[in-house]
Amino acid sequence: MFSFNIDEIDTQGLHKLLATEASDIKLIDVRMPTEVAQGVIPGAENIPLNTLPYRLGELPTDKTVVFYCRTGARSAQACAYVAAQGHENTFNLRGGIMAWVGGGLAVA
């Protein structure tokens, strides 16, 4: 679908970044609201993947943006899409929220 390389971050790497540089990270959950109701990574903003083209202007250009979904597939699509629009410093959370929870990390 897209020919861009996707930069990924694992759960432990993201956890460390959020603990030390929270003001420089924008965490975007691209799942649907019904999925988000089951739990989110603290501090994340919900922008469902299907609304991303309409909400692209809400993404900061001066911060690192990390996208996540349930398993990492939709968030990889989000990364590819925003890269195609010229955004840099975007990462996909490898394994999504399932890997986050599986690693024993907190959800809200």
Image (cartoon, rainbow, N blue to C red):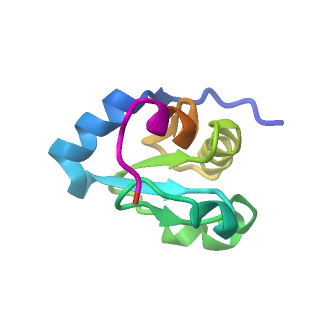
Q: Nearer the viewer, residue 27 or 88?
A: 27
Residue 27, image x, y percentages: 42, 54
Secondary structure mostly seen in the magenta stretch: loop
On the rendered structure, is 101 left or right of 35?
A: left
Compared to 50, does 7 lie above or below? above
On the rendered structure, is 5 left or right of 93?
A: right
The quadrant holding residue 14 is top left
Q: Residue at x 68, y 67 (%)?
A: 34
Q: Is residue 102 magenta?
A: yes
Residue 76, image x, y percentages: 65, 38
- The span picked out in magenta is 100-107
The quadrant holding residue 96 is top right
Specify the quadrant that holds the C terminus: bottom left
Q: Residue at x 53, y 43 (%)?
A: 97
Q: Residue at x 36, y 58 (%)?
A: 42
Compared to 11, does 82 lie above or below? below
The quadrant holding residue 105 is top left
